[in-house]
Image (cartoon, rainbow, N blue to C red):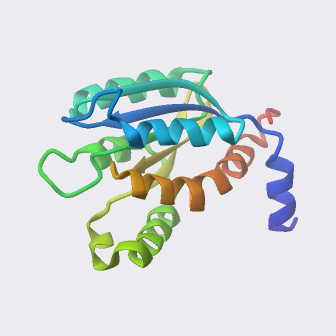
Amino acid sequence: MAYTQHQQQAGGIVPRCGIITLSDTRTPETDTSGQLIKQLLIDDNAVVDAYTLIRDEPTELRAILNDWLASPRIDVIITNGGTGISGRDQTVEVIASVIQTPLPGFGELFRMLSYEQIGSGALLSRAMAGIARGGGRGKVIFALPGSTKAVALAMEKLILREYRHILRELNKDSGEP
């Protein structure tokens, strides 16, 4: 089946999403990246079932991921923050520990698009995506940088264009949409 047909068949899926912002300095009121993710998802007719802002602490992130992976209410988890190279940036390591199927193309494409915007600084991003199994079904996790401009790029150029298609592929054998 042609790629465009796969995307069309996925068009009726209503993704149920959770957003995690990791930051040692932001508050819910100053979390422009998390709020942008939420607004873009709502505008795309997805359901935002959960949103949380936590410090860049691996144990707290791991606990939330485990809860959300077990929840039937969440299909897509999008994090922002903690994907850089500083000592506090541990998001990638935690997310990698729960992913069974990496989607390396996401990080590669994100860095390519980011390079077009910011140049060689794009190599400092460890944005990633993959599939984790939780609650008996596959769920997609995207780890984005904390920059609002980077979040907009990832959401508009990659995630919003593909997350329904990914969910369709993950669940086509389960009888669910």
Indicate the position of residue 11 as horizontal and vertical percent values.
Answer: 81, 46
Residue at image coords 19%, 58%: 85
Say which quadrant the N terminus sits in: bottom right
Up-down: is 43 above or below 102?
A: above
Say which quadrant the C terminus sits in: top right
Residue 90, quarter of picture: top left
Viewer-closest of 43 and 126: 43
Residue at image coords 40%, 33%: 20
Indicate the position of residue 94 as horizontal and vertical percent values.
Answer: 30, 41
Residue at image coords 73%, 40%: 171
Indicate the position of residue 19 as horizontal and vertical percent values.
Answer: 47, 33
Residue 120, quarter of picture: bottom left
Up-down: is 144 above or below 114?
A: above
- Whether residue 132 is visible, yes or no, is no
Residue 124, quarter of picture: bottom left
Residue at image coords 46%, 66%: 110
Indicate the position of residue 82 as horizontal and vertical percent values.
Answer: 27, 46
Viewer-closest of 83 and 140: 83
Viewer-closest of 135 and 54: 54
Q: Could you tell whether 160 is left or right of 65 in the image? A: right
Q: Could you tell whether 83 is left or right of 136 in the image? A: left
| Residue reaching furthest to the front | 29
- Whether residue 168 is visible, yes or no, is yes
| Residue reaching furthest to the left | 87
